Image: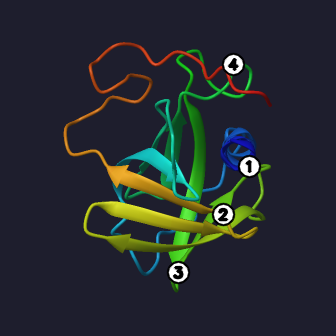
Amino acid sequence: MIIKTLSLITLLSASVTLSSCVTSPAVTGDSSIVGTWKWTSANHHAIGYPFYIRYGTDAKMMTWPAPEGWSDSKGISHGTYSVANGTLTLYGDRSKEAVATSKIRVRQDQLIMTTEDGNQLVYQRVLAPVQPGKLEDGSPAGFSKHPR
């Protein structure tokens, strides 16, 4: 439970920082992450709540649901990213400085991220269209209730 909470806080911290991004680095190398993903596990423990991330072809990304105050009015956090040599880099603070990096690999419909502190986060590709700020059933995702 502690690992899941720490992983979520790490991820949400990156998402919050990303919400103030103004730069759009190019997607280089591996573009196989483009699309929408649902977080399913952290260090082999299932995630029991919805959390989505969408990577666009324009190097922009969105995460939801994000905590109120860290996101727009629909609970969506915005940011930018780049992929090069198997490393996903997230950008924030209105600069080109990285706020988080993870080694990634895509295996069929799974995105496996290994964070700088060694946590393994697994995301499952969402095949049916999910609109940002909504859950897979179409209902509003709202804001995350997790601690900052």
> Residue 84 bears which disc, if any?
3
Relative side of 88 to 4, left or right:
left
Q: Mark 1 points at which residue?
A: 10
Relative side of 28 to 19, left or right:
left
Going by the numbered disc 3, the residue's amino acid type is: Ala
Whichever of labels 3 and 2 marks the residue nearer the N terminus, that label is 3
Of the two numbered discs 1 and 2 in the rendering, the one whose residue sits closer to the viewer: 2
Q: Do the residues labelled 3 and 4 touch (CB within 8 Å)?
A: no
Whichever of labels 4 and 1 marks the residue nearer the N terminus, that label is 1
Of the two numbered discs 4 and 2 in the rendering, the one whose residue sits closer to the viewer: 2
Would you call the spot at circle 2 few (<14 residues within 10 Å), some (14-19), or many (20 or more)?
Answer: some
Going by the numbered disc 2, the residue's amino acid type is: Asn
Q: Name the residue under label 2.
A: 119
Residue 21: x, y in percent?
A: 68, 46
Distance from Cα at disc 1 to Cα at disc 2 = 10 Å
Going by the numbered disc 4, the residue's amino acid type is: Glu
Distance from Cα at disc 4 to Cα at disc 2 = 25 Å
Going by the numbered disc 1, the residue's amino acid type is: Thr
Q: Mark 4 points at which residue?
A: 68
Relative side of 18 to 42, left or right:
right
Q: Residue at x 68, y 45 (%)?
A: 18
